[in-house]
């Protein structure tokens, strides 16, 4: 029986229309490793792997590791976005801010 972690990974992977192989490539894992996380009773991923999976699936590691099987709320999605934003190069951040400023001007 899959764990809540496995259920979340599978659900989010399918929502993003990623195959096991695609998620494995994006997280520098093997296809069999991702399958085991999704299907084994008590998976024990490393902090590094769970971080990479959370990043690709655009959620937080905390969301993936909680026992709840609920869908990620806006707060989780926003936090994942801000973590991703913090790691972006300065020029990318600057372009995103310009896009947001232009969007505000249209209103």
Image (tube, rainbow, N blue to C red):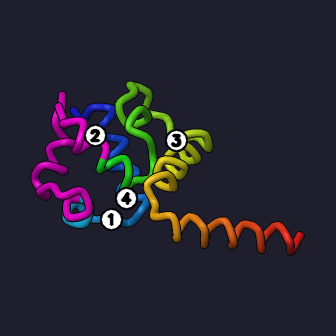
Q: Which mark is residue 14?
A: 4
Of pointers 3 and 4, the one earlier in the residue sequence: 4
Residue 6: image location, x then y, percent = 28, 40
Q: Quadrant of residue 68?
A: top left
- Magenta span: 24-51
Q: Secondary structure at mark 1?
A: loop
Residue at the (56%, 64%) spot, across then down: 93
Q: Residues within 10 Å of mark 1 (few under 14, many from 20)?
A: some
Mark 3 → mark 4, Cα distance in angstroms: 14 Å
Identify the image quadrant of the C terminus.
Answer: bottom right
Above or below for 15 versus 3: below
Identity of the residue furthest to the front in this view? 90
- Observer-nearest of 12 and 62: 62
Q: Residues within 10 Å of mark 4 (few under 14, many from 20)?
A: few
Mark 2 → mark 1, Cα distance in angstroms: 15 Å
Of pointers 3 and 1, the one earlier in the residue sequence: 1
Residue at the (21%, 32%) spot, across then down: 1
Q: Which mark is residue 72?
A: 3
Q: Secondary structure at mark 3?
A: loop
Membership of 25 in magenta stretch: yes
Q: Secondary structure at mark 2?
A: helix
Of pointers 4 and 2, the one earlier in the residue sequence: 2
Residue 82: image location, x then y, percent = 54, 49
Q: Secondary structure at mark 4?
A: helix
Q: Would you say the magenta stretch is mainly helix, strand or loop? A: helix
Mark 4 → mark 2, Cα distance in angstroms: 12 Å
Number of marks in the image?
A: 4
Q: Nearer the viewer, mark 3 or mark 2?
A: 3
Q: Which mark is residue 6?
A: 2
Mark 3 → mark 1, Cα distance in angstroms: 18 Å
- In the picture of the structure, the residue carrying the numbered disc 1 is 18
Contact? badges 1 and 4 (CB < 8 Å): yes
């Amino acid at each position: 029986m899959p764990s809540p972690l496995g259920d979340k990974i599978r659900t989010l992977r399918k929502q993003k229309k990623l195959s096991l192989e695609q998620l494995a490539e994006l997280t520098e894992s093997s296809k069999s490793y991702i399958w085991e996380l999704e299907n084994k009773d008590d998976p024990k991923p490393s902090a590094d792997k769970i971080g990479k999976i959370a990043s690709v699936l655009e959620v937080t590691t905390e969301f993936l590791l909680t026992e709840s099987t609920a869908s990620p709320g806006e707060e989780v999605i926003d936090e994942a976005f801000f973590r991703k934003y913090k790691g972006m190069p300065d020029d990318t951040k600057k372009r995103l801010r310009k896009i947001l400023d232009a969007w505000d001007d249209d209103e």
